[in-house]
Image (tube, rainbow, N blue to C red):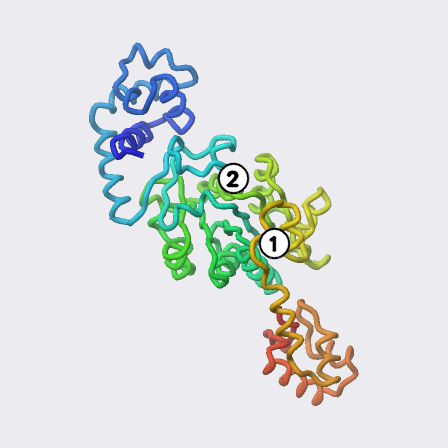
Amino acid sequence: MHTEELRAWLALSFIPGLGPAGCRALVAHCGGPGQALRAGQAALAAVPGVRREALAALVAQARGPSWREADEELARVAAAGARILVWADPDYPELLRTIHNPPLMLYVKGRADLLRAPGMAVVGARAASDYGLRAAHRLAGQMTDRGLVIISGLALGIDAAAHRGALAAGGGTVAVLGSGVDVAYPEQNRPLYEQIASQGALVSEYPMGTAPEPFRFPARNRIISGLGLGILVVEAARRSGSLITAQLALEQGREVFAVPGRVDSLKSEGTHRLLQEGAKLVQTVEDILEELPGHGGRPGHGPVVAAAAEAVDLSPAEELVVAFLDVYPKNIEEIILGTGFSAQRAGELLMLLELKGCITSMPGKQFQKSG
């Protein structure tokens, strides 16, 4: 988009009380953002669906203040190495354009091309279990290897695991922020924020420098679901933002997938509810890909991991311990009772299996099968 047209869109967006819908209505009526800013009171009064207060602010500010704000914003965007995609821009992601109330503009830091590539949203609990984190990381990496971009919200837990899984597989990932693209939040994820800015894309509908206030996150969820072909929910409590995002995805006509958890896990109550309501149960990446015709891509990591595991030389006793363990942790007492080995022998076998990478030790003398 030409700089002067972008400048006009920005100036229009800074008019108090106008909002995205009002901006679109004015542009449609007047023929462009510049024309809307130059229109007189009489012409603006004929625009349907725009409040009088917003029209009065437009007349009062269009000649100066909003243009100055637009120029200052463009300078901040350039300094951050970002760009802006306006709703009318040909580079604006087509899937997002079709949702109810799409963002008027998207601030993008990093690879804007990822926003138009086939993608899958991955969301879930912030206080995720190790099982959930490993599932999100593994599935994100495998989807990336099949040509899908991973979209999430840079939150702690499942979001971060999905972003890391995509990056570890050498693929693309998009982080949709509830702040300006120049604001890293949460602070614990700053290294991941920097990595995504370099290898993926940071996206926000909010102006530069916008603080991550709580009310912004539910609004950004419609962008997470709207950018993808579908959404994968990995661990969600009965009342969670992830379920809201899944509902938005349904309303947008997207596919909804869910990873099952333990029946007694509070962290999976929400995902189990989604499954009861018809979400597609996901055990492997193939469960996702078969619902997305034409997105097979390259072979996934699954067979490679399996082959590597088969190559490990295990004794019959070690195989018995591995067979007894699961992806959920079991304590040493359970392992002794379940395998029939003495405490000393069980300890020796567990140490050997951990050295071979077949199991993982957890706090409290607990062990689980490696992913």
Q: CA distance from mark 2 to mark 1?
A: 18 Å
Q: Secondary structure at mark 2?
A: helix
Report the front residue among 91 and 204.
Answer: 91
Q: Is residue 197 above or below residue 86?
A: below
Q: Position of residue 32 (x, y in %)?
A: 33, 23
Residue placed under numbered mark 2 in the picture: 226
Residue placed under numbered mark 1 in the picture: 234
Residue 302 is left or right of residue 56, and the answer is right
Which mark is nearer the camera, 2 or 1? 2
| Rendering quarter of residue 308 | bottom right
Q: Is residue 6 above or below residue 331?
A: above
Q: Residues within 10 Å of mark 2 (few under 14, many from 20)?
A: many
Q: Residues within 10 Å of mark 1 (few under 14, many from 20)?
A: many
Residue 116 is left or right of residue 231, and the answer is left
Give the residue at x 25% y 29%: 66
Q: Residue furthest bottom?
A: 344
Three-letter amino acid code of the residue under disc 2: Gly
Give the residue at x 42% y 26%: 21
Give the residue at x 39% y 34%: 90
Q: Secondary structure at mark 1?
A: strand
Q: Is residue 94 above or below residue 117?
A: above
Residue 263 is left or right of residue 256, and the answer is right
